[in-house]
Amino acid sequence: MEHARHVLRVLFALVVILGVFIVGRSFAVPESYGFRGPYRYSNLQEQMDRSKPLHGGTVSCTGCHEDKVDTQEGPGHKSVNCEVCHGPLGKHANADKKIADALVDKSFHVCERCHQEIVGRPKDFPQVNLQDHVADVDEKLEGAVCLECHDAHSPRP
Amino acid sequence: MLEDSTEIESRPSQRREFLTAAAVVVGGSVVMTLNRARAAAEAKGGGDKKAKADTAKEDKGGKEDKGNKEEAKAAASANEPYDPTQHRWAYLIDTTKCIGCGSCVRACKAENDVPHDFFRTWVERYAIGGEQSHVDSPEGGMNGFGQIHVPFAPTKAFFVPKMCNHCTATPCVQVCPVGASYRTPDGVILVDQDRCIGCGYCVQACPYGSRYLNEKTGTADKCTWCYHRITKGLKPACVEACPTGTRQFGDMKVENDPVRLAIEKERVQVMQQHLLTEPNCYYLGLDKEVR
């Protein structure tokens, strides 16, 4: 068996390399890897905790502004989230305390974004050519002209 | 000669000792490592549950800034740790209702701190007239859309909101060289920011163009269906913001979920069906021209 000595040396070297690999891998591979698939499972929790939710939805506004929410009469803006016009909850309040004024933009631009008549909007959606619409009541399209006739929360005149 | 033979005889025994010692060291460390791995796997089964319970308690503390109703609802769901295997999320977009106001794009930008000029969700407008078509998406539709200027009279025009489709057979997870991109048990495609090397292969692989490389972190980024919200019983920010009910989010594992019912009963489409990516964003009213 002296002729096998060179083979045994190579086999031994391979076993050493394999051993080093197994030991090294146990340090390098994250613990939660492979739990449910070829990824680091603990990342799921990290993604859940990544940031605090910024938007609260209309229900989050009723905590302090129930009266304003109640003024909305359907069908128009009643189904619209307050944050669409007034910005996200997280920029206005934190832990039941106000941290900054909510966005209140009274200019026609806010209304224009949804209600200007443009190509692409569904035909049954309330939209008007704003220039013609204000001209009908002898007004110019500037500033808070929409609010002269429409209540932003119950817009049907 | 006699001295030579004694030296020659001691060499095999020296070698034998060395080999035995080496085999013991290597074998011992391998066994030790395997033992450690087995112990860690056993501990993880119980440890994961504990980690989730701890996070649930933290969640409850952070809920106080919401209204009373939301607080009660969220507290109820925060008491149980979130189990991803109990949910299978799906998204429904009704393009017949979209008015192109861009509230969803603005909400997503704010909620997820999306870098300027990049979008996790965006809205496109299609104007089609006979053989000709025109697509525009000014700033992703973030500030709404303006008038259209095309050299033809469109016979049909509509808006199509787009985002990551969180496909079941997704190419982006397949091509990731480091396994940073993965599919969670509840069907959301996420990117592990610690493992991502920013090679951009997934950005190229996505047929829907929903990924981008975040310049600040140097990693790939995309819509996560607001994972930090849906795991707390909330809806994604875009769904929350949509004023017309175009965007809907639901759980396929809940029997009377409106999204599940819509997918089961209505005629829904998916984008780029021929690529067999099995998207989980379903569309109603999708035109053949939409790419």
Image (tube, helix red, strand yellow):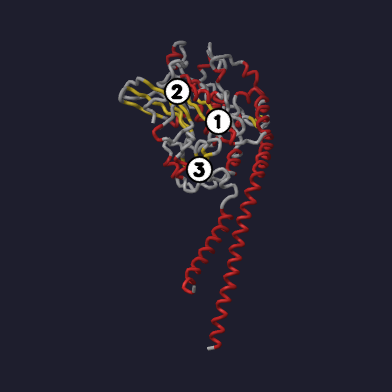
Name the image quarter holding residue A66: top right
Q: Are marks 3 and 1 on the same chain?
A: yes
Secondary structure under badge 2? loop
Above or below: residue B282 compared with residue B18: above
In percent of the image, x 59 and y 62: which residue is there?
Answer: B27
- Eyeballing the image, is B199 above or below A25? above
- Residue B232 in picture, x, y percent from top left: 62, 33
Residue mark closest to the camera, 2 vs 1: 2
Whether residue A103 is visible to the viewer of this picture, yes or no, is no
Q: Answer with left or right where residue A118 lies relative to residue B59.
A: left
Which residue lies at the image location 42% right of the left edge and 35% below the top edge?
B276
Q: Secondary structure at mark 1?
A: loop
Judged from the image, the secondary structure of the residue bearing numbered disc 3 is strand
Q: CA distance from mark 2 to mark 1?
A: 24 Å
What residue is disc 2 on? B267
| C-alpha span from label 3 to label 1 | 20 Å
Q: Amino acid at mark 2?
A: Arg
